[in-house]
């Protein structure tokens, strides 16, 4: 769903002929590496640089070799599983006339119309019997897990429950979802799969630390689950346990859920939602448009409508929602270059050098419910600085007299004034605001090691030395630089216009 699928490569563990036992949860060598990995995750939470990522990467590769071939390694090539997947859908009674599963250039697998569709026309209807749903633990295949801490994690993060359900089904012989699982991607272009070399292409980007943090977070989660599951009684016959609960399968299951899940209604009266994997629908790639997917709780079906007119032969796409390219890369594995909803996050915070003025600024921000420090958006669209970003900086640069004037207003009046780009505190405040924003955006461009033009030449090069992950990283940093460059220039023009 919106990702570039790569050819399945045999793991380094498998290629080196590892002879680790199938159930390696008690293997001393693996568990020693796990302990080192867990400490590396929990004791270095603020060290999110390339050196740290390389250390994580190397520990994960050591763990892969120690654990031996995973269930994922034993799957056939994805292309060989298409026929079985379609036969499974047909046997279950899913009506798929009018669509076909095909490879889309530069996108991987997707759906294509075989007949014309008008906008809002019904395209697909997928019953919940085809879906893998994280509804509850007690009624599912993982019911034997009674650890209070694990159940708490499942309650707070149902998508993690869905990932473990998928991982369990991967290990089940003749699973109901076997044809679907076999046709899922074998790997993803999420930051979880970035090699140390891939990650270098985000040098200078504010996104690099967040991408490394994703690896740290999921690695830490795996270590924690491995520890908790080892201490559980009576679960040794669960497929997820008997197959060794290997990290490669865990990373794959988490990545599958992050990039393909959708929430469905499991209790109409209570309006209870649960994450689910929806076969066939999850092959739809992304394009801008309108939300065109709905869930009918009365019929227990996911309904996909045409978000625009489609001619026969057109790719059928859905809109993933108004998300930044960083979010799309982290959770779907791709960058959408024509993303009108894109933005860059910049860190802003109050200065404590002037305690009295700082306290007044803090009080104003609290009154309009804006944090005193945090990440604020610089938008791609023509109104780069709107809402909370604009309000924060207007307060940040306000003089003592302006702060006193603003403090006389209530929260509603303040929000109306400060969040509106068409209004202003004063001409002087507006000049200071946009001058600050122009310089801040320009400052954030300095750490990048390449220009936008150099990125474009690298992407258009035909020598093929860029991995797909690296290509997505270059696309992301180019989008970020473009936003910051244009925003800085536009803010500078605003200052010039105010001085005339």
Image: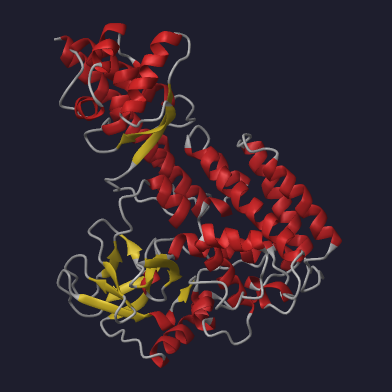
Image-based side of 33 in relation to 54, left or right: right
Q: Position of residue 344 (x, y in %)?
A: 38, 36
Q: Residue at image x 28%, y 69%?
A: 294
Image-based side of 467 in relation to 127, left or right: right
365, 379: nearer the viewer = 365
Q: Position of residue 417 (x, y in %)?
A: 20, 25
Q: Position of residue 4 (x, y in %)?
A: 45, 61
Screen quadrant of the C terminus:
top left
Above or below for 363 versus 325? above
Q: Residue at image x 22%, y 30%?
A: 412
Residue 103 visible, this orientation? no
Q: How many marks?
A: 0
Query: Where, by quadrant of the figure, is residue 3 drawn?
Result: bottom left
282, 421: nearer the viewer = 421
Screen quadrant of the N terminus:
bottom left
Image-based side of 363 in relation to 35, left or right: left
Above or below for 256 versus 224? below
């Amino acid at each position: 769903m919106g990702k570039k699928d790569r050819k399945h490569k045999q793991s380094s563990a498998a290629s080196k002929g590892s002879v680790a036992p199938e159930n390696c949860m008690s293997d001393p060598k693996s568990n020693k590496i796990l302990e080192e990995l867990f400490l590396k995750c929990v004791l270095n939470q603020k060290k999110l640089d390339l050196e740290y990522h390389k250390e994580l990467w190397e520990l994960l590769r050591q763990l892969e070799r120690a654990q031996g071939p995973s269930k994922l390694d034993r799957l056939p090539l994805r292309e060989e599983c298409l026929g079985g997947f379609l036969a499974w859908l047909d046997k279950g009674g899913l009506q798929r006339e009018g669509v076909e599963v095909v490879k889309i250039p530069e996108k991987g697998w997707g759906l294509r119309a075989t007949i014309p569709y008008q906008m809002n026309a019904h395209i697909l209807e997928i019953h919940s019997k085809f879906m893998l749903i994280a509804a509850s633990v007690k009624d599912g295949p993982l019911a034997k897990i009674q650890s209070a801490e694990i159940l708490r994690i499942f309650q707070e993060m149902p998508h993690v429950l869905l990932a473990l359900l998928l991982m369990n089904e991967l290990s089940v012989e003749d699973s109901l979802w076997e044809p679907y699982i076999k046709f899922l991607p074998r790997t993803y272009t999420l930051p979880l799969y970035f090699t140390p070399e891939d990650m270098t292409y985000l040098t200078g980007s504010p996104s690099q630390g967040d991408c490394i943090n994703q690896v740290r977070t999921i690695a830490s989660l795996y270590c924690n689950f491995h520890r908790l599951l080892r201490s559980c009684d009576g679960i040794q016959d669960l497929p997820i346990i008997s197959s060794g609960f290997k990290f490669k399968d865990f990373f794959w299951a988490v990545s599958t859920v992050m990039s393909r899940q959708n929430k469905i209604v499991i209790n109409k009266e209570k309006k209870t939602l649960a994450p689910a994997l929806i076969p066939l629908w999850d092959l739809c790639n992304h394009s801008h448009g309108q939300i065109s997917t709905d869930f009918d709780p009365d019929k227990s079906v996911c309904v996909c409508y045409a978000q625009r007119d489609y001619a026969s032969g057109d790719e059928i796409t859905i809109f993933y929602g108004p998300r930044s390219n960083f979010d799309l890369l982290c959770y779907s594995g791709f960058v959408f270059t024509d993303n009108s909803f894109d933005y860059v996050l910049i860190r802003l915070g109050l200065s404590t050098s002037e305690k009295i003025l700082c306290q007044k600024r803090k009080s104003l921000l609290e009154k309009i419910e804006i944090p005193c420090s945090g990440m604020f958006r610089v938008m791609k669209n023509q109104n780069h600085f709107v809402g909370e970003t604009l309000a924060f900086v207007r307060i940040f640069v306000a003089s003592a007299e302006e702060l006193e004037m603003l403090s006389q207003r209530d929260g509603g009046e303040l929000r109306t004034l400060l969040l509106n780009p068409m209004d202003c505190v004063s001409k002087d405040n507006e000049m200071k605001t946009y001058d600050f924003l122009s310089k801040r955006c320009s400052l954030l461009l300095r750490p990048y090691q390449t220009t936008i033009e150099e990125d474009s030449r690298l992407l258009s090069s035909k020598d093929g030395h860029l991995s797909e992950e690296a290509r997505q990283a270059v696309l992301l940093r180019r989008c970020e630089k473009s936003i910051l460059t244009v925003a800085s220039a536009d803010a500078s023009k605003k200052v010039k216009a105010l001085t005339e």
